[in-house]
């Protein structure tokens, strides 16, 4: 059995209808995140963030691959590779 070495971000997202949806985004390895400037405490539970990336192949899944995390104060941190069209 092999374990995935990547990091995950789990978010509560308010949909257009006002309902909360649970989303998850796979990101780079912890060491890659640290090299990009992300470290423990950069984002805390309850912080508002924007994650840019790619939706999972399953259009019904609330999941995707993260490419960039933007904090409420505008800081941008690479959390994954940039490939293909960004949504």
Image (cartoon, rainbow, N blue to C red):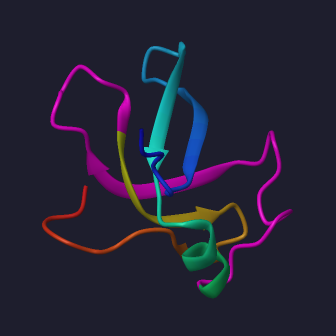
Rendered-image quadrant of the C terminus:
bottom left
Question: Residue 86 falls in which quadrant of the image?
Answer: bottom left
Give how far across and how far down residue 41 sits, in percent. 86, 62
Depth check: give the residue in front, 61 or 48. Answer: 61
Please state if 78 lies on the left or on the right of 62 as rendered.
right
Q: Residue furthest front?
A: 1
Please state if 59 lies on the left or on the right of 68 as rendered.
left
x 58%, y 46%: residue:
9
Give how far across and how far down residue 26 sits, in percent. 44, 50
Residue range corresponding to the magenta coloring: 36-63
Residue 35, compared with residue 25, is above or below; it is below
x 47%, y 66%: residue:
28
Question: Residue 84 falls in which quadrant of the image?
Answer: bottom left
Please state if 55 lies on the left or on the right of 42 as rendered.
left
Which secondary structure class fits the magenta region best? loop
x 37%, y 35%: residue:
63
Depth check: give the residue in front, 61 or 5. Answer: 5
Give the number of callouts. Answer: 0
Residue 46, compared with residue 48, is above or below; it is above
x 50%, y 57%: residue:
5
Rendered-image quadrant of the N terminus:
top left
Give how far across and how far down residue 20 sits, in percent. 57, 17
Residue 39 is inside the magenta segment: yes
Residue 2 is inside the magenta segment: no
Residue 73, compared with residue 60, is above or below; it is below
Give how far across and how far down residue 27 sits, in percent. 47, 58
């Amino acid at each position: 059995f092999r374990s995935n070495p990547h990091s995950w971000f789990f978010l509560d997202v308010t949909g257009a209808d006002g309902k909360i949806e649970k989303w998850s985004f796979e990101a780079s390895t912890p060491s890659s995140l640290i090299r990009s400037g992300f470290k423990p405490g950069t984002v805390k539970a309850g912080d508002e963030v924007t994650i840019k990336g790619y939706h999972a192949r399953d259009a019904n899944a609330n999941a995707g691959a993260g490419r960039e995390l933007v904090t409420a104060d505008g800081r941008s941190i690479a959390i994954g590779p940039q490939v293909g069209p960004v949504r």
